[in-house]
Amino acid sequence: MREPIAALMDQLESIVFGQSVAVRQVVTALLAGGHVLLQGVPGVGKTRLARAITHLVGGTFRRIQFTPDLLPSDVVGNAVFNLRDGTFEVHPGPVFANVVLADEVNRTPPKTQAALLEAMEERQVSLFGETRSLPEPFFVIATQNPVEYEGTYALPEAQLDRFLMEVNMGYPDLDGEVEMLRRHRSGTGPYLARLSPVLTLTELSGMLREVQNVTAAPEVLLYIARLVRATRELRGVALGASPRAATALLDAARANAYLEGRDYLVPDDVIQVAKPVLRHRLALDAGAELEGIRADDVVDQVVEQVDVPR
């Protein structure tokens, strides 16, 4: 299935300019069956990327604009009283889709943010005493703007830990920005009209199962465990990576190996995904932040310190 995956990434890169690293990381998370926290300034293509993925795999897409007055029922669904037969009818919310874009997720209070927790972790939603399964595959892309803090609510650690990866979308490079301007000048029409679906949902679900069959030698599992444990022992780290981070690192590394056309892990697969998997799971103390140390710097230090298995 390497050809459809290559076509998927090529088409995504054709409408999200200069974001090849972010595109690969998002596709990696999709194949690993995880969710993505997409961070970037306005206008770099976060919403476009989410819509394009849905179009290319033939799935259903719902966008939830998170605002301070959004209620949990606006996310998972509500019950409406039917006057004709005197019963309540359950109306599923926008979370019931293959790809859900939680736009500006940090603009809503924690109570509404938590409405996504069960959906993201259990792939199901409890609605008025009924447990309803979510569509398969189910992929959440949540966005947040790193430069706006007024009227925002920081995501709690429990919520952050549900995201397999935090992917940073920066500004495109010069060539990417020039290409964007060229396409815009030529008036090529709506971007979704330029994309051709390359996968079906059935094929994508099959790929997710194949990723879970990628093998990992005991030495690589030990390497993952040592990397995660090392984040808890460094000076300046107030909260290191949790045991769930180790399983997330394994899942993402498997997907990276699958993208490379292998059915087994090598240490480089782990290194390739270490930053997006671990950066949002680390909390630095005040001293480290004053020194300008970032979570990515901690991950670099850990990768440098821990011996790579041969």
Image (cartoon, grey):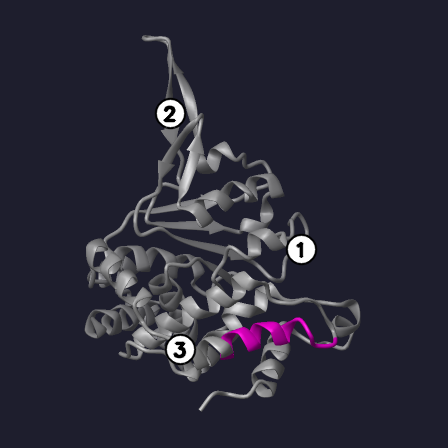
Q: Which quarter of the rendered picture does the N terminus lie within?
A: bottom left
Q: Which residue is mark 2?
A: 90
In the visual, does 70 lie left or right of 253? right
Mark 1 or mark 3: which is in front? 1
Q: Residues within 10 Å of mark 2 (few under 14, many from 20)?
A: some
Mark 1 or mark 2: which is in front? 2
**CA gap, disc 1 and disc 3:** 29 Å
Where disc 2 sits, the SS reads: strand
Name which quarter of the figure residue 283 lies in. bottom right
Where disc 3 sits, the SS reads: helix
Q: In the image, what residue occupies the spot 56% across and 77% down?
A: 226
Residue 200: percent from left, percent from top: 20, 56
Residue 160: percent from left, percent from top: 56, 56
Boundaries of the magenta span: 223-235
Q: Which residue is mark 1?
A: 149
234 part of magenta stretch: yes
